[in-house]
Amino acid sequence: MSHPNSFYITTPIYYVNDVPHIGHAYTTVAADVLARYWRLRGRDVFFLTGLDEHGQKVQQAAAKAGIDPQVHCDKLAPQFQDLWKRLNISNNAFIRTTDISHKSVVQQYLEDLFSKELIYKDNYTGWYCTFDERFWTEKDIEAGLCPDCKRPVERISEHNYFFKMGQYQNRLIEHIAQHPNFIRPESRRNEILGFLTTQKLGDLSISRPKSRLSWGIELPFDKDYVTYVWFDALVNYVSALEYLRATPSREQYWPASVHLVGKDILTTHAVYWSTMLMALNLPLPETIFAHGWWTVNGEKMSKSRGNVVDPNKMVDQFGADAFRYFLFREVPFGQDGDFSQSAMVTNINSDLANGIGNLLSRTLTMIERFANGTIPALGTPALPELEALIAATATTLPERIDQGFTALAFRENLQAIWELIGLCDEYIDKAAPWQLAKNPDNHPRLNTVLNTASKALRLLSVLMYPYMPQTAVQLAQQLGLSFDFSKPMPQTVYEWETPLAEVKICKGAGLFPRISIGSETISVGLKESAEVKEIDKEDKPGKPQGAKTVNDATTPPQPTTVTLAPTTATPKTSAPAAAAAPAQITIDEFMKIQLKTAKVLTAERVPKSEKLLKLQVSLGEGTEQRQIVAGIGKKYEPEVLIGKTIVIVANLKPAKLMGIESQGMVLAAGDSEVRGLITLLEDVEPGTKVK
Ligand code: ME8
């Protein structure tokens, strides 16, 4: 039995047949949220993720790239590891099934089962698709064709080794029946039970002849065969404990607390892995949780559809924490979800920028203004009823969150946390500290408001940490608290009654930029502090009680406007008036504009024009070159532009300017006068999409 205080969490090990996508990020971030939560609560966590490097898919991907499979794996592995770093994944170990030690554990287990006669050799006859290199059963095939690629299948017979899986059927049914938490969510448990109680469980072919597939772990008892990739892969959950820690730690961590998997691979875990463990005399994991599937704008995600969501781009655009938040706020864990960029922008603006970001910023601004930058001690009640409600909510919140994490209720936990944020906003709006500040008699009440909001933020930072670790750290720092999130958090931090006073705050940048996309402006403006405006307005008549004043449609931030350089075929519509509120467009409309990076190859002045420069730009090696006429000649000498990477609108209808064709438009900041060209901090290849 594992140690009662330990928590062993795993993700599937992903195939290295392609780069990671949002689905891989989803499971891995989910595991990270749990790992961070239980570490903070003092449990001894072991968090494992890694890569499944053998088998047909990987062999095919390597063959397609024309390289050796191991070289292919070594090339792709860093793409996963780098992404996990960018997403702040705190895994304790990273397993690759081509690790020598893993291979040797797999071979030991095979040897063990073979010697106990739990593995036997037999003839297998089935319908084989040469193109897909796989067998199908009679009921799979459709009119003699492969159900996958629609090519004719052949009836072939071959020898293989089989694991006596079928003999464990009743034991497995019993185990599932007696352990309600073994397969979750419940609907998935019922699916597996339904299948096990109505169909006969066959034996499992655990080998592949090398003549068909050579990329795998050789069977220790027959060198003409390699191990079936699933037998090899599932063993990772135990083999990692043998060699990826300084001292082997099977006793400490096995059985795993939670195997997180997508619903696509529940059967292999619930049935293959469970019966393998029974045969190996090892205890079964406590929970196998199968989460749902992400689609993109309502469609299945696939390379051929070109809609695969790249988590790296999400981090570039929105930051790791906002992306992590979105994954769990949007969809209940266990159900399918649909990804869309517009939903993400809405989420970030409403919950992060206007929610937690605004609460922190307005609280700190008031502490700076009304309390000399130091959190004051509790004074006299300002709004006793709301204060009691906040206290009651905050007192029970840690326990609710604890239960939520035990149940893997990621979304419900976020909702519970955001209830407290909502209450605090309402409290500040109603207490109107900027009015209390005007009369010294009201200062004890003012202090209570500032103190209560600060205490709520203290609790919010530790509760939010598993989901948004960077944000939590920043929040605590700005509140002036020296939390060490790398260690278990003292229980007192979770307790509402723990006093907080005389702490010097350290207000910094806003936590989340509000993202707004207007028809003619693309602006990413930092949120402003609510009370800067509220204090200035004070109790101006007409302001509705409790209304949110920040960054809603009526008080948009005023970031620098990014305009399309006024050079183009349609100058009338492309020079926006900065002051006029631009009409809103949908993300889909915005997406019609194709922005790309381009390298300036040559630049020269257009004769008789002060303003116009004629540029030849490249959109990538071996691809097209374009001529663009841009109105940036007052600002730039042509020579300085050569070699620079700029951003252009690539799908603009060509137009003639002073008789010269312009095939696109250059992006620059400024209104009627160009003030700066849009360039890139990094050395990005020309032709890269800009979003
Ligand atoms: O199956 N939505 O690897 P894999 C949500 N190597 N999650 C998704 C997803 C989507 N659209 N697409 C993928 C394998 N996932 C085996 C596992 S384990 C011993 C061996 C996630 O690269 C989800 O966790 O195909 C799914 O189970 C996993 O990626 C499959 O990754």
Image (cartoon, rainbow, N blue to C red):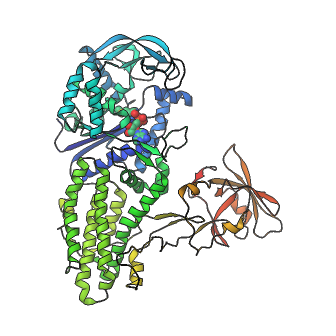
- Based on the displayed image, in which of its 4 quarters is residue 680 positioned? bottom right
Relative to 431, does residue 509 appear above or below in the rendering? above
| Relative image position of residue 77 (x, y in whole percent) | 45, 38
For this rendering, which residue is in front, 404 or 666? 404
- With 64 as the anchor, is 385 left or right in this view? left
Q: Is residue 480 visible?
A: no
Which of 158/570 is in front? 570
Q: Is residue 152 visible?
A: yes
Q: Residue at x 51, y 27 (%)?
A: 60
Of residue 322 and residue 619, the one placed in the foreground of this image is 322
Image position of 566 with respect to 130: above or below? below
Q: Position of residue 550 (x, y in %)?
A: 42, 73
Q: Work out whether 322 lies above or below 32.
A: below
Q: Position of residue 70 (x, y in %)?
A: 47, 29
Quarter of the figure with the N terminus: top left
- Where residue 391 sits, quadrant-wise, is bottom left
Q: Looking at the image, how many numbered discs can be counted on the residues?
A: 0
Give the quadrant of residue 45.
Answer: top left
On the image, the x and y values in percent for residue 535 come to 38, 82
**Quadrant of ligand 1 in image:** top left
**Residue in view at x 25 percent, y 85 percent:** 443
Quadrant in the picture for the C terminus: bottom right
